[in-house]
Image (spheres, rainbow, N blue to C red):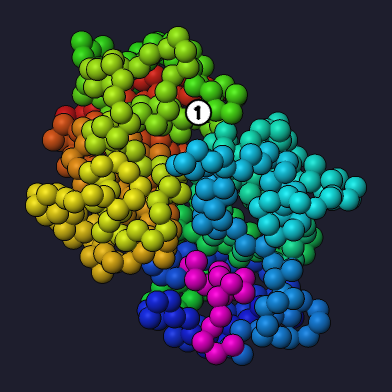
């Protein structure tokens, strides 16, 4: 029996035909893993399967969860859970304080998981004893029981992703749709996730995964590729080609292990931290850091989910300040500057950044906002700045999207816009937090070439990632964090 089936389904978004005649069938107990390039339509396909988007012929999609086939998604949606990067962005936005001082939602992890029973991100209903028991089980299954009382705004991106997975599965859906579900998870967390989901699959739950990375799809799901409006069952697609680990690309590199607070010997530093701690929601995220980053070093930033990588980069970028007693020197200056001044000189690309833009801003305006460091359409630009925006649109192949609203982009397209925005004002330092998430192979190669060009011109880079293949082979330093502390540094002598 098919839980959901598409027969010659046609999907159109803002006048653009995503699929003209798509066929797909998922039977009870089956699971599918789908890959495709940015803009191929992976998210659109999942929205069709979730009942969020109507095909142009309603009868081209049918659901059957035991009460007979129907084209209406009204009852089917009770049996379906859908988790996407946009759901995570929505959650983060709820926790952010407003510009006029209004407070965001102060949901704890336990409360967030509980809202999964009610299809709402606000908890108004009284929970039954059975629901409470299921919530506690979900917290344990996804290894977030130790942060159950923390507010969502204090979590790392990887921790938040696990919380939202627990929320999506807490009510026991029969069909689970996961768009880039393993994005932001370290290798151990991915393995744990797929083990939990595999056990549910063996118990009869069906899954549809969508991703652009082989390692972020479970081996036990049937493999499909999506491209040019067509879905094919194909295990040998080039999109599944194994990535070359950075250690192999850098074969022959000598490595010097240094004291935790020292990246390398240098008389000048890009950043210097002295007794720096950072607290979020009263929780210590970074702890008493003494560290410096010398000129000429490009950093890989490593650590498991919750180690403090994102907070570390946000601190360097000026978005967070040290607690009392600590100090930070940025680009040779210890005196504080307004954050928008640092944003012109230090560019940060992170998952959190993606949530802060006003929905109605266009792609062109979002890129132009890089000159002022804000998240709304900028004030009047001068001629040189306008020219830089136009050049950037072409360099990142974004001109066809220039007038499209930011909130109407795919996840991969959004990430490309943020990368373009980061570089439009010619920053001195670029901080990349899981910047390749949501990008296909071709776009990642384009990014690598652009970053190498900038590094040769003197721009400094720090790159946090859970994927070794994401690190450019010209990076010559590494910092490893654990439990909010720098536990190791290394500097590589690159071969000539």
Identified at 54% across, 46% down, the residue is 92
Identified at 74% across, 58% down, the residue is 118
Identified at 44% across, 15% down, the residue is 276
Callout 1: SS: loop
* Quadrant housing residue 439: bottom left
* Image quarter (top left, top right, bottom left or bottom right) of the C terminus: top left
> Residue 330: where, in percent of width, then height?
28, 21
Left or right? Give the position of 370 relative to 234.
Answer: left
* Image quarter (top left, top right, bottom left or bottom right) of the N terminus: bottom right
Q: Residue furthest left?
A: 383
* Quadrant housing residue 463: top left
> Residue 315: where, in percent of width, then height?
40, 27
| Observer able to see residue 29 | no
Relative depth, front residue between 150 and 451: 150
> Is 314 inside the magenta-drawn segment?
no
Relative depth, front residue between 255 and 351: 351
Magenta segment range?
Answer: 42-58
Q: Residue furthest front?
A: 100
> Residue 342: where, in percent of width, then height?
28, 31
Identified at 72% across, 54% down, the residue is 116
Query: Is disc 1 surrounded by few (<14), some (14 to 19) or many (20+) residues within 10 Å?
Result: many
> Residue 434: where, in percent of width, then height?
42, 42
Left or right? Give the position of 120 relative to 413.
Answer: right
Examine the rendered structure and indicate whether residue 214 appears above or below residue 460: below
Q: Which residue is mark 1?
A: 308
> Is 43 inside the magenta-drawn segment?
yes
Examine the rendered structure and indicate whether residue 242 appears above or below residue 57: above
């Amino acid at each position: 029996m098919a839980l959901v089936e598409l027969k010659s389904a046609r999907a159109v978004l803002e006048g653009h035909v995503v699929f003209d005649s798509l066929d797909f069938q998922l039977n009870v107990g089956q699971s599918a893993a789908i890959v495709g390039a940015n803009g191929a339509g992976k998210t659109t396909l999942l929205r069709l399967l979730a009942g969020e988007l109507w095909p142009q012929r309603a009868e081209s999609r049918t659901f059957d969860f035991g009460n007979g086939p129907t084209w209406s998604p009204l009852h089917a949606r009770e049996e379906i859970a859908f988790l996407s990067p946009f759901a995570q962005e929505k959650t983060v936005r709820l926790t952010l304080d407003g510009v006029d001082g209004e407070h965001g939602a102060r949901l704890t992890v336990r409360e967030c998981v509980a809202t999964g029973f009610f299809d709402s991100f606000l908890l108004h209903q009284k929970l039954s004893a059975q629901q409470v028991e299921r919530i506690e089980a979900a917290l344990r299954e996804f290894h977030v029981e130790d942060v159950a009382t923390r507010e969502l705004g204090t979590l790392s991106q990887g921790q938040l992703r696990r919380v939202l997975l627990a929320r999506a599965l807490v009510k026991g859906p029969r069909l689970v749709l996961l768009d880039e579900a393993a994005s932001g998870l370290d290798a151990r967390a991915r393995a744990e996730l797929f083990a939990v989901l595999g056990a549910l699959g063996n118990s009869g739950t069906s899954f549809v995964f969508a991703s652009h990375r082989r390692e972020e799809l479970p081996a036990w799901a049937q493999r499909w590729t999506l491209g040019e409006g067509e879905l094919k069952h194909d295990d040998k697609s080039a999109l599944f080609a194994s990535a070359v680990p950075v250690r192999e690309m850098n074969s022959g590199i000598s490595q010097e292990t240094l004291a935790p607070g020292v990246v390398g010997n240098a008389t000048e530093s890009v950043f210097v931290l002295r007794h720096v701690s950072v607290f979020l929601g009263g929780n210590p995220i970074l702890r008493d850091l003494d560290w410096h980053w010398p000129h000429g070093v490009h950093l890989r930033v490593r650590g498991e989910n919750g180690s403090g990588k994102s907070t570390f980069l946000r601190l360097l970028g000026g978005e967070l300040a040290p607690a009392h007693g600590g100090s930070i020197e940025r680009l040779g200056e210890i005196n504080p500057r307004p954050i928008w001044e640092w944003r012109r000189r230090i560019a940060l690309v992170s998952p959190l950044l993606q949530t802060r833009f006003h929905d109605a801003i266009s792609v062109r305006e979002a890129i132009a906002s890089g000159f002022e460091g804000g998240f709304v359409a900028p004030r009047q630009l001068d001629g040189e700045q306008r020219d830089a925006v136009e050049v950037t649109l072409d360099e990142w192949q974004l001109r066809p999207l220039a007038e499209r609203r930011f909130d109407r982009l795919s996840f991969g397209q959004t990430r490309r816009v943020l990368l373009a925005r980061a570089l439009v004002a010619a920053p001195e330092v670029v901080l990349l937090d899981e910047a390749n998430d949501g990008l296909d192979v071709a776009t990642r190669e384009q990014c690598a070439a652009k970053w190498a060009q900038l590094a040769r011109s003197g721009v400094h880079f720090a790159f946090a990632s859970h994927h070794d293949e994401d690190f450019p082979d010209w990076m010559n330093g590494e910092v490893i964090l654990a439990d909010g502390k720098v536990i190791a540094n290394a500097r590589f002598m690159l071969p000539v």
